[in-house]
Image (cartoon, rainbow, N blue to C red):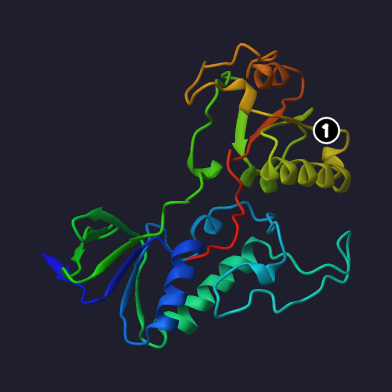
Amino acid sequence: MTRRVDVDYLVVGAGAMGMGFTDALIDHSPQVRVALVDRRHGVGGHWLEDYSFVRLHQASSFYGVASTVLGGYRVQTGGPEAGLWERADQPTIVSYYADVLADRMVGPGRVDHFPGCEYVGDRQFVSRISGERYEVPERCRIVDARYLAPDIPAETPPQFTVEEDARVVPVNELVRVDEAPSQYVVVGSGKTATDACVAADAWCRSRRHLLGASARALDAQPLIRRPGPGHLSPHARHPPRVCGAAASSSTRARCVSPTTRSSSTARPTA
Protein backbone atom coordinates (compact mmCIF):
# COMPACT_ATOMS: atom_id res chain seq x y z
CA MET A 1 0.00 0.00 0.00
CA THR A 2 1.26 3.51 -0.89
CA ARG A 3 0.90 6.35 1.59
CA ARG A 4 0.14 9.80 0.19
CA VAL A 5 2.17 12.76 1.52
CA ASP A 6 0.35 16.04 0.87
CA VAL A 7 3.14 18.58 0.36
CA ASP A 8 4.04 21.34 -2.09
CA TYR A 9 7.74 20.44 -2.44
CA LEU A 10 9.65 17.18 -2.23
CA VAL A 11 13.33 17.85 -1.51
CA VAL A 12 15.52 14.81 -2.18
CA GLY A 13 18.72 15.00 -0.15
CA ALA A 14 19.13 16.52 3.32
CA GLY A 15 22.75 17.60 3.02
CA ALA A 16 24.07 21.15 2.86
CA MET A 17 22.27 21.90 -0.41
CA GLY A 18 18.93 20.36 0.57
CA MET A 19 18.93 21.98 4.00
CA GLY A 20 19.93 25.37 2.59
CA PHE A 21 17.20 25.26 -0.05
CA THR A 22 14.51 24.14 2.39
CA ASP A 23 15.49 26.81 4.92
CA ALA A 24 15.25 29.58 2.29
CA LEU A 25 12.01 28.16 0.87
CA ILE A 26 10.07 28.15 4.13
CA ASP A 27 11.46 31.59 4.96
CA HIS A 28 10.26 33.21 1.72
CA SER A 29 7.05 31.18 1.30
CA PRO A 30 5.41 30.86 4.73
CA GLN A 31 2.50 28.72 3.47
CA VAL A 32 4.39 25.92 1.67
CA ARG A 33 4.70 22.40 3.03
CA VAL A 34 7.87 20.43 2.38
CA ALA A 35 8.84 16.76 2.54
CA LEU A 36 12.58 16.28 3.13
CA VAL A 37 13.85 12.84 2.10
CA ASP A 38 17.31 11.35 2.61
CA ARG A 39 18.76 7.84 2.49
CA ARG A 40 20.80 8.49 5.64
CA HIS A 41 19.47 8.35 9.19
CA GLY A 42 19.63 12.10 9.74
CA VAL A 43 20.35 15.46 8.12
CA GLY A 44 23.77 16.81 7.22
CA GLY A 45 24.58 14.64 4.20
CA HIS A 46 28.23 13.63 3.90
CA TRP A 47 29.04 15.20 7.26
CA LEU A 48 27.38 12.21 8.93
CA GLU A 49 30.00 9.92 7.36
CA ASP A 50 33.09 12.18 7.44
CA TYR A 51 36.12 11.58 9.64
CA SER A 52 35.69 13.10 13.08
CA PHE A 53 38.72 15.44 12.91
CA VAL A 54 37.73 17.20 9.67
CA ARG A 55 37.12 20.96 9.81
CA LEU A 56 35.64 23.48 7.41
CA HIS A 57 37.84 25.17 4.84
CA GLN A 58 36.58 28.57 5.90
CA ALA A 59 35.09 30.37 8.91
CA SER A 60 31.96 28.74 10.31
CA SER A 61 29.87 31.86 9.73
CA PHE A 62 30.20 31.37 5.95
CA TYR A 63 28.66 27.90 6.08
CA GLY A 64 25.22 26.48 6.84
CA VAL A 65 21.71 27.80 6.23
CA ALA A 66 20.79 31.47 5.82
CA SER A 67 18.54 31.74 8.87
CA THR A 68 20.92 30.36 11.50
CA VAL A 69 24.56 31.32 12.02
CA LEU A 70 26.96 28.44 12.57
CA GLY A 71 29.48 29.08 15.33
CA GLY A 72 28.10 32.37 16.59
CA TYR A 73 31.00 34.38 15.10
CA ARG A 74 33.37 32.95 17.68
CA VAL A 75 37.10 33.63 17.47
CA GLN A 76 39.67 30.94 18.28
CA THR A 77 41.64 31.67 21.43
CA GLY A 78 44.30 28.97 21.26
CA GLY A 79 46.35 26.84 18.91
CA PRO A 80 48.02 27.79 15.60
CA GLU A 81 44.88 29.64 14.44
CA ALA A 82 44.42 31.80 17.53
CA GLY A 83 42.76 35.09 16.62
CA LEU A 84 41.05 33.71 13.52
CA TRP A 85 37.36 32.89 13.13
CA GLU A 86 36.26 29.46 14.31
CA ARG A 87 36.22 26.59 11.80
CA ALA A 88 33.63 24.05 12.93
CA ASP A 89 34.49 20.36 13.17
CA GLN A 90 32.36 17.40 12.09
CA PRO A 91 30.44 16.82 15.37
CA THR A 92 29.60 20.53 15.59
CA ILE A 93 28.25 20.66 12.03
CA VAL A 94 26.16 17.50 12.48
CA SER A 95 24.67 18.93 15.67
CA TYR A 96 24.01 22.26 13.94
CA TYR A 97 21.99 20.69 11.13
CA ALA A 98 20.05 18.54 13.59
CA ASP A 99 19.10 21.66 15.57
CA VAL A 100 18.05 23.53 12.42
CA LEU A 101 15.83 20.61 11.42
CA ALA A 102 14.17 20.42 14.84
CA ASP A 103 13.83 24.13 15.62
CA ARG A 104 13.25 25.68 12.20
CA MET A 105 11.58 22.98 10.14
CA VAL A 106 9.92 20.04 11.87
CA GLY A 107 9.12 21.81 15.15
CA PRO A 108 6.94 24.57 13.61
CA GLY A 109 5.24 21.99 11.39
CA ARG A 110 6.63 23.31 8.09
CA VAL A 111 8.62 20.25 7.08
CA ASP A 112 8.06 16.49 7.23
CA HIS A 113 11.36 14.63 7.53
CA PHE A 114 11.71 11.12 6.07
CA PRO A 115 15.12 9.67 7.02
CA GLY A 116 16.30 6.33 5.68
CA CYS A 117 14.29 6.70 2.48
CA GLU A 118 15.28 6.40 -1.17
CA TYR A 119 13.64 8.41 -3.96
CA VAL A 120 12.72 5.94 -6.74
CA GLY A 121 11.24 8.35 -9.27
CA ASP A 122 7.66 8.85 -10.47
CA ARG A 123 6.99 11.05 -7.41
CA GLN A 124 7.58 8.16 -5.02
CA PHE A 125 10.09 7.28 -2.31
CA VAL A 126 10.54 4.10 -0.29
CA SER A 127 11.73 3.41 3.25
CA ARG A 128 15.00 1.45 3.18
CA ILE A 129 14.05 -0.16 6.50
CA SER A 130 10.35 -1.03 6.35
CA GLY A 131 9.82 -0.97 2.60
CA GLU A 132 6.84 1.36 3.02
CA ARG A 133 6.15 3.38 -0.11
CA TYR A 134 5.18 7.07 -0.22
CA GLU A 135 3.97 9.33 -3.02
CA VAL A 136 3.41 13.06 -3.46
CA PRO A 137 0.62 14.74 -5.50
CA GLU A 138 0.97 15.95 -9.09
CA ARG A 139 1.13 19.58 -8.01
CA CYS A 140 4.20 18.87 -5.87
CA ARG A 141 7.53 20.13 -7.20
CA ILE A 142 10.50 17.75 -7.02
CA VAL A 143 13.85 19.26 -6.00
CA ASP A 144 16.88 16.97 -6.37
CA ALA A 145 19.53 18.32 -3.98
CA ARG A 146 21.97 15.44 -4.57
CA TYR A 147 23.64 16.95 -7.64
CA LEU A 148 26.84 18.01 -5.81
CA ALA A 149 27.00 15.01 -3.46
CA PRO A 150 30.68 14.05 -2.94
CA ASP A 151 32.17 10.57 -2.89
CA ILE A 152 32.84 9.40 0.67
CA PRO A 153 35.91 7.13 1.26
CA ALA A 154 34.06 5.23 3.98
CA GLU A 155 31.35 4.30 1.45
CA THR A 156 33.38 3.61 -1.72
CA PRO A 157 36.08 1.00 -2.47
CA PRO A 158 39.61 2.11 -3.50
CA GLN A 159 39.91 2.89 -7.21
CA PHE A 160 43.34 1.29 -7.52
CA THR A 161 44.94 -2.13 -7.23
CA VAL A 162 45.73 -3.34 -3.71
CA GLU A 163 47.94 -6.32 -2.84
CA GLU A 164 46.50 -8.94 -0.55
CA ASP A 165 48.92 -8.24 2.31
CA ALA A 166 48.41 -4.46 2.23
CA ARG A 167 45.95 -2.80 4.54
CA VAL A 168 43.97 0.06 2.97
CA VAL A 169 41.55 2.02 5.14
CA PRO A 170 39.52 5.23 4.75
CA VAL A 171 40.61 8.29 6.70
CA ASN A 172 37.84 7.64 9.24
CA GLU A 173 39.80 4.63 10.55
CA LEU A 174 42.84 6.70 11.58
CA VAL A 175 41.20 7.42 14.93
CA ARG A 176 41.14 3.67 15.61
CA VAL A 177 44.88 3.04 15.16
CA ASP A 178 45.91 0.26 17.55
CA GLU A 179 49.27 -0.79 16.13
CA ALA A 180 52.61 0.70 15.10
CA PRO A 181 52.89 0.75 11.29
CA SER A 182 56.32 1.45 9.79
CA GLN A 183 54.85 4.28 7.71
CA TYR A 184 51.67 5.77 6.32
CA VAL A 185 51.07 6.11 2.58
CA VAL A 186 48.33 8.67 1.97
CA VAL A 187 46.76 8.35 -1.48
CA GLY A 188 45.67 11.79 -2.68
CA SER A 189 46.94 15.33 -2.23
CA GLY A 190 43.82 17.37 -1.46
CA LYS A 191 42.46 18.70 1.81
CA THR A 192 41.48 15.24 3.07
CA ALA A 193 45.01 13.96 2.41
CA THR A 194 46.47 16.97 4.22
CA ASP A 195 44.19 16.36 7.20
CA ALA A 196 45.32 12.72 7.25
CA CYS A 197 49.02 13.71 7.24
CA VAL A 198 48.56 16.27 10.01
CA ALA A 199 46.55 13.84 12.12
CA ALA A 200 49.00 10.98 11.64
CA ASP A 201 51.95 13.24 12.49
CA ALA A 202 50.23 14.54 15.63
CA TRP A 203 49.35 11.05 16.85
CA CYS A 204 52.84 9.74 16.10
CA ARG A 205 54.29 12.35 18.42
CA SER A 206 51.63 12.00 21.13
CA ARG A 207 51.27 8.20 21.30
CA ARG A 208 54.28 6.27 22.54
CA HIS A 209 53.53 3.12 20.53
CA LEU A 210 53.50 5.17 17.30
CA LEU A 211 56.80 7.01 17.78
CA GLY A 212 58.99 6.81 14.72
CA ALA A 213 56.17 6.30 12.22
CA SER A 214 55.98 8.70 9.29
CA ALA A 215 53.37 9.95 6.86
CA ARG A 216 53.88 10.78 3.21
CA ALA A 217 51.34 11.75 0.57
CA LEU A 218 51.01 10.08 -2.80
CA ASP A 219 48.82 11.84 -5.34
CA ALA A 220 46.51 9.24 -6.85
CA GLN A 221 45.50 11.34 -9.86
CA PRO A 222 48.58 10.67 -12.06
CA LEU A 223 48.30 6.95 -11.28
CA ILE A 224 44.72 6.38 -12.37
CA ARG A 225 43.65 6.85 -15.97
CA ARG A 226 40.07 5.76 -15.40
CA PRO A 227 38.14 4.18 -12.49
CA GLY A 228 38.88 0.57 -11.76
CA PRO A 229 41.92 -1.47 -10.76
CA GLY A 230 44.98 -1.78 -12.96
CA HIS A 231 44.46 1.30 -15.15
CA LEU A 232 47.64 3.38 -14.87
CA SER A 233 48.94 6.42 -16.68
CA PRO A 234 52.12 5.90 -18.73
CA HIS A 235 53.62 8.70 -16.63
CA ALA A 236 53.31 6.70 -13.41
CA ARG A 237 56.73 5.98 -11.94
CA HIS A 238 55.43 3.96 -8.98
CA PRO A 239 52.31 1.79 -9.38
CA PRO A 240 49.83 1.42 -6.52
CA ARG A 241 51.75 -1.67 -5.38
CA VAL A 242 53.82 0.75 -3.30
CA CYS A 243 51.28 0.12 -0.54
CA GLY A 244 51.87 -3.61 -0.69
CA ALA A 245 55.64 -3.19 -0.85
CA ALA A 246 55.61 -1.07 2.26
CA ALA A 247 53.39 -3.57 4.01
CA SER A 248 55.82 -6.40 3.35
CA SER A 249 58.32 -4.97 5.85
CA SER A 250 58.57 -6.27 9.39
CA THR A 251 56.03 -3.72 10.56
CA ARG A 252 53.08 -3.27 8.28
CA ALA A 253 52.32 0.08 6.69
CA ARG A 254 48.89 1.63 6.68
CA CYS A 255 47.63 2.98 3.36
CA VAL A 256 45.02 5.66 3.91
CA SER A 257 42.62 6.37 1.07
CA PRO A 258 41.01 9.81 1.20
CA THR A 259 38.25 10.90 -1.13
CA THR A 260 39.07 12.30 -4.55
CA ARG A 261 36.74 15.20 -3.85
CA SER A 262 36.90 17.59 -0.94
CA SER A 263 34.78 16.61 2.03
CA SER A 264 34.12 20.25 2.90
CA THR A 265 32.11 22.07 0.28
CA ALA A 266 31.34 25.76 -0.09
CA ARG A 267 28.09 27.12 1.22
CA PRO A 268 25.26 26.37 -1.23
CA THR A 269 23.81 29.32 -3.07
CA ALA A 270 20.33 27.81 -3.53
- As drawn, is 56 to the left or to the right of 28? right
- As drawn, is 91 to the left or to the right of 15? right
For residue 57, what is the image quadrant? bottom right
- As drawn, is 261 to the left or to the right of 210? left
Q: Position of residue 81 (x, y in %)?
A: 86, 62
Q: Position of residue 190 (x, y in %)?
A: 68, 40
Q: Amino acid at mark 1?
A: Ser
Q: Which residue is under mark 1?
A: 214
- As drawn, is 268 to the left or to the right of 208? left
**Which residue is at a point 72% across and 27% down the rendered structure image?**
253
**Which residue is at a point 55% across and 24% down the rendered structure image?**
160
**Which residue is at a point 87% across and 38% down the rendered structure image?**
211
Looking at this rendering, what residue extends furthest in the left direction? 1
**Which residue is at a point 21% across and 73% down the rendered structure image?**
5
Front-lying residue, 249 or 137:
137
Q: Is residue 15 visible?
A: no
Q: In the rendered view of the protein, which quadrant contains the N terminus? A: bottom left
Q: Is residue 57 visible?
A: yes
Q: Position of residue 47 (x, y in %)?
A: 56, 58
Q: Position of residue 93 (x, y in %)?
A: 61, 67
Mark 1: secondary structure: loop
For residue 59, what is the image quadrant? bottom right
Q: Residues within 10 Å of mark 1 (few under 14, many from 20)?
A: some
Give the vertical position of 10 relative to 108 (above or below). Answer: above
